[in-house]
C-alpha cells in the first residue's frame, strides 16, 4: 500500500529549477534511499514532503490525504517525522527535555503527562545510543550526537514515515556498523523510511530501493544492485567533478 506519493513535482527558486517533474511512490514498510550529487535536490524534496516548502507544480499524497501546501505541523500530525541535514534542536533544553517535546507533540488525546514524556524520552535515547547524555544541554553536543538526538525526537512523535537527511554524517568514521544497526532497529519498529544516505556499502545492506536525483530530475528508481551499477548513475556522480 502506498503511504506517500509525489506526482510531477517541480520546485523553482527564482530562475533555478531545483526539482523537475519528479514522480515517485513509497510503499508502507519500505526503506528507500535517496541518492544524488551535491545540489541535486534531495533536501528540497524532503522540504516539499514535510511542508517546509510548497512545490511550484505537482501534488503530494500522504496517508491517503493530499498534503500539497499544508503546514509542517499538519503533516507531522498525520505521522511524518524528519531529521535535518543541519540539526536544529532546542539548544537551551536538555537532551531528555528535547525528546520529551517530541512525545508531548503527539495528538492531544494521546499526549502523555510531562513525567511520562520524560520517561519515554529516555527509552528513545536508549534506542539511538544516547542514554548517557540525557541530562546534557543540547547546545553542548557533537554533530554526531545532535543527529542521534534529532532521531530520538522524531521517533518520540511516533511517526509512520521517517525522512532522514544524512543520518550518518557526523557519526564517527567506522560507525558504519552502528548506522546499519540503527536502520535495523527502526525497521523493526515498523517504520517506513526514506533516507538520504551516501555510503554505497551501507545502502546495499539496508535499502530495499534507491531513488537517484541528478540536477533535479529523477534518473533511477530500482533495487540497489541495479541502481548502483547503472551507467547513468555513475555518470551523474562523475559529472559532479566537472564544474
Ligand atoms: N531556499 C532556497 N533558495 C534558493 N535556492 C535553493 C534553496 N534551497 C535549495 N536551493 C538550491 O536548490 C538546489 C538543490 O538543493 P538541495 O539542498 O535540495 O540539494 P541536495 O541534493 O540536498 O544537496 P546536498 O547533497 O549538498 O545536501 C541547489 O542548487 C540549491 O542551491
Ligand atoms: Mg541536502
Image (cartoon, helix red, strand yellow):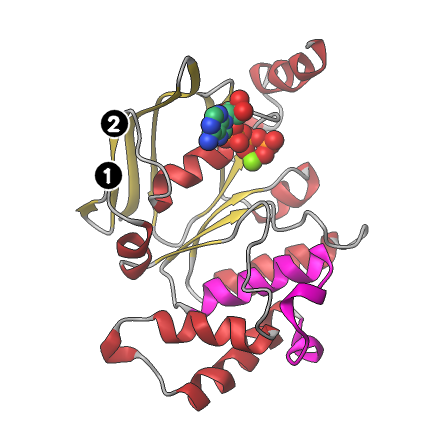
- At x 72%, y 66%, the residue is 140
Residue drawn at x 44%, y 72% is 101
Q: Residue furthest front?
A: 92
Residue 35 visible, this orientation: no
- Whether residue 178 sits left or right of residue 105 in the image: it is right
Which quadrant of the rendered structure holds the C terminus?
A: top right
Q: Earlier in the sequence, mark 2 or mark 1?
A: 2
- In the depicted structure, whether residue 155 falls above or below residue 28: below
Q: Secondary structure at mark 1?
A: loop
Residue 149 painted magenta: yes
Give the quadrant of residue 24: top left
Q: Position of residue 145 (x, y in %)?
A: 68, 62
List the residue tagged with mark 2.
58
Residue 42 part of the magenta segment = no
Circle 2 SS class: strand
Picture residue at 34% right of the left edge, 52% below the top? 28
Q: Where in the figure is residue 13, as x and y percent of width and height?
A: 41, 22
* Disc 2 to disc 1, C-alpha distance: 8 Å
Report which quarter residue 136 is drawn in: bottom right
Q: Main secondary structure of the magenta part?
A: helix
Figure check: 205 above or below 116: above
Report the residue marked by disc 1. 68
CB within 8 Å, label 2 to label 1: yes
Q: Which residues are magenta?
A: 130-156
- Tell me where residue 221 appears, x and y as whole percent: 45, 28
Amino acid at each position: 500500500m502506498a503511504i506517500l506519493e509525489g506526482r510531477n513535482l517541480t520546485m523553482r527558486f527564482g530562475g533555478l529549477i531545483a526539482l523537475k517533474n519528479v514522480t515517485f511512490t513509497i510503499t508502507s514498510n519500505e526503506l528507500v534511499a535517496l541518492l544524488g550529487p551535491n545540489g541535486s535536490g534531495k533536501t528540497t524534496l524532503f522540504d516539499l514532503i514535510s511542508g517546509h516548502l510548497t512545490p511550484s507544480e505537482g501534488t503530494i499524497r500522504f496517508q491517503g490525504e493530499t498534503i500539497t501546501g499544508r503546514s509542517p505541523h499538519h503533516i507531522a500530525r498525520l505521522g511524518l517525522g524528519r531529521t535535518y541535514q543541519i540539526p536544529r534542536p532546542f539548544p537551551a533544553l536538555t537532551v531528555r527535555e528535547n525528546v520529551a517535546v517530541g512525545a508531548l507533540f503527539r495528538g492531544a488525546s494521546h499526549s502523555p503527562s510531562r513525567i511520562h514524556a520524560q520517561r519515554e524520552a529516555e527509552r528513545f535515547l536508549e534506542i539511538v545510543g544516547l542514554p548517557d547524555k540525557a541530562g546534557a544541554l543540547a547546545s553542548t553536543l557533537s554533530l554526531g550526537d545532535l543527529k542521534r538526538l534529532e532521531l530520538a525526537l522524531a521517533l518520540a512523535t511516533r511517526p509512520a514515515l521517517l525522512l532522514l537527511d544524512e543520518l550518518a554524517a557526523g557519526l564517527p568514521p567506522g560507525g558504519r556498523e552502528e548506522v546499519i544497526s540503527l536502520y535495523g532497529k527502526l525497521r523493526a519498529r515498523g517504520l517506513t523510511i526514506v533516507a538520504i544516505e551516501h555510503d554505497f556499502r551501507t545502502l546495499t545492506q539496508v535499502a530495499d530501493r534507491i531513488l537517484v536525483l541528478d540536477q533535479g530530475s529523477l534518473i533511477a528508481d530500482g533495487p540497489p544492485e541495479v541502481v548502483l551499477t547503472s551507467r547513468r548513475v555513475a555518470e551523474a556522480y562523475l559529472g559532479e567533478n566537472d564544474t
